[in-house]
Amino acid sequence: GQQVMQIPQYQHVQEGEDFTTYCNSSTTLSNIQWYKQRPGGHPVFLIQLVKSGEVKKQKRLTFQFGEAKKNSSLHITATQTTDVGTYFCAGGSGNTPLVFGKGTRLSVIA
Amino acid sequence: NAGVTQTPKFRVLKTGQSMTLLCAQDMNHEYMYWYRQDPGMGLRLIHYSVGEGTTAKGEVPDGYNVSRLKKQNFLLGLESAAPSQTSVYFCASSRDNPDTQYFGPGTRLLVL
């Protein structure tokens, strides 16, 4: 079945440094979604990408969808303590439910 | 608009006991999902429903049953709890698939 791999598993950064998490699917995706889960909280939707090569920005966050629609990345510029949490990608394909990656846990040292 | 709510928030069970987790959504969503979240394992889909009266197995369905008698409710049952079912359980709903999933606050379950 479809698998979604996400790296790294953990990332510790100094406040102000950049951060990137990568997502790779074993199959071609119809779309990819990104979610953020704060410590002790629940996953919250950030964005959805559907087009090959698509790039979307939300303030300091930049999301990319690969040309082959099998990989994606989330880049945060100049991290802040409010960015702390676990970031999940989730791949959609056909009528099957989204498959979530295992997430990247980001900690920011002030 | 409460979104997605889950009951209870926390529960302790002894091995072999049964319980039902309730998920309710007020967004008139067709799709509902149950996930479990364990450290380092991400979100794993247990069961899901594509509409009232329907259910389907996800990635890790063994030991769980579900029912969707009403569109707004999705119940997850554990007939005979095992320590391996200690986890945080999240319910989610979406209008369509694939579409944005809205998650409930979670139920923390400890099986002794």
Image: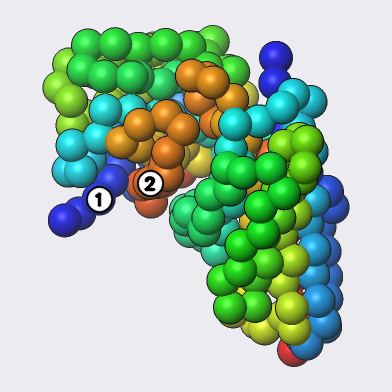
Give the position of the C terminus of chain B as an image quadrant. top right
User: Label 1's element?
Assistant: loop
Does residue A9 appear left or right of residue A31 in this picture?
right
User: Mark 1 packing: few (<14 Cα in 10 Å), some, or many (20+)?
Assistant: some
Q: Which mark is residue B102?
A: 2
Inspect the image, locate mark 1, and give the three-letter code of the amino acid beneath it: Gly
Residue drawn at (53%, 55%), measured in percent from left and top?
Answer: A47
Image coordinates of residue A17 in percent, x first then y, are 82, 82
Image coordinates of residue A53 in percent, x first then y, are 72, 49
Instruction: State yes or no: discs 2 and 1 in contact (Cβ < 8 Å).
Output: yes
Residue drawn at (21%, 29%), measured in percent from left and top?
Answer: B73
Does residue A63 appear left or right of residue B5 in this picture?
right
Q: Which residue is mark 1?
A: B3
Image coordinates of residue B37 in percent, x first then y, are 58, 39
Does residue A103 appear left or right of residue B47 in this picture?
right
Chain letter, disc 1 residue: B
